[in-house]
Amino acid sequence: MSPVLLITGASRGIGAATAVLAAKQGWAVAVNYTRDAQAAAHVVQEIRAKGGQAQAFQADVGIEADIERLFQSIDKDMGVLGGLVNNAGVLDVTARVDTTSWERLERIMRINVLGSFACAKQAVLRMSTAHGGKGGSIVNLSSVAATLGAPGQYVDYAASKGAIDTLTVGLAKEVATEGIRVNAVRPGLILTDIHASGGIPDRANQLAHQVPMQRPGTATEVAEAIVWLLSDAASYVTGTTIDVGGGR
């Protein structure tokens, strides 16, 4: 029976690319989405067309009750969880800290930070040998913005990803003897539609000159790192963050 992998925010971008690649590597993929059921269904269809296993699950990772329902649905419909990719995340239009509203901050931190913590909690409750589980792997999505700060654009988003870096290190040490590895991937300028959410759809290409490799990356290039960290090939890797940023 294929191990079950939950990928949050898997209907588009890095999440979708990771779902397709993970399915090729033998994972049965739970494709989480918030609103776009059609996009999630397309990812599931692509995986199944290639002989893989996948199922879509609606849940807003910014709502604790939705997260609990999501994991319970996966338990019922797919079986024992073996992996989690905390991929879902949001940003907002470019703004300085001195113009940032409380509502904006709350939304970004709730989805990017609280959602990742809550999903990690549910995964540990199922995978940890201390809770009767068989182990597993968690990969968190950080961002190069966490190290750069994103001044004048979205310091709030960068700060949320800094929290993900800390979650990765702390949780990895916490469950290291319980059969769970916890790592992260820190993408740089990647060609996805998240940049449109920040009001600059072509941002990745516009800033490509700042990247030593002189080009933006692709969602699949990030997915390759994620799927490797999930795999047994990374069996002695935990508490580690891999930069996928072209040297930036």
Image (cartoon, rainbow, N blue to C red):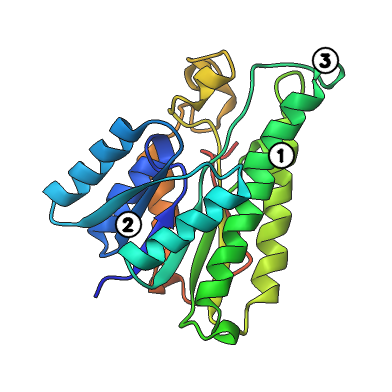
* Relative vertical location of residue 59 with respect to residue 128 in this rendering, above or below: above
Q: Secondary structure at mark 3?
A: helix
What amino acid is at disc 2? Answer: Val
Quadrant in the picture for residue 44: top left
> Looking at the picture, how far across and down is residue 28, in whole percent?
29, 62
Q: Residues within 10 Å of mark 3 (few under 14, many from 20)?
A: few
Rounded to the nearest angstrom, the CA distance separating label 2 from label 1 is 26 Å
Q: Which residue is mark 1?
A: 109
| Mark closer to the chain start, 1 or 3 | 3
Quarter of the picture holding the C terminus: top right
Q: Position of residue 112 (x, y in %)?
A: 64, 42
Q: Secondary structure at mark 1?
A: helix
Q: Which residue is mark 3?
A: 99
Q: Position of residue 86 (x, y in %)?
A: 53, 52
Disc 1 marks which amino acid?
Met
Q: Is residue 168 left or right of residue 141?
A: right
Residue highlighted by disc 2: 29
165 over 88 or under it: above or below: below
* Residue shown at 80% from the left, 20% from the top: 100
Residue 48 vertical position relative to residue 169 in the rendered view, above or below? above
Residue 176 vs 107, above or below: the answer is below
> Which corner quadrant holds the N terminus?
bottom left
The residue at the point 12 percent across, 47 percent down is 49
Q: Nearer the viewer, residue 203 or 81?
A: 81
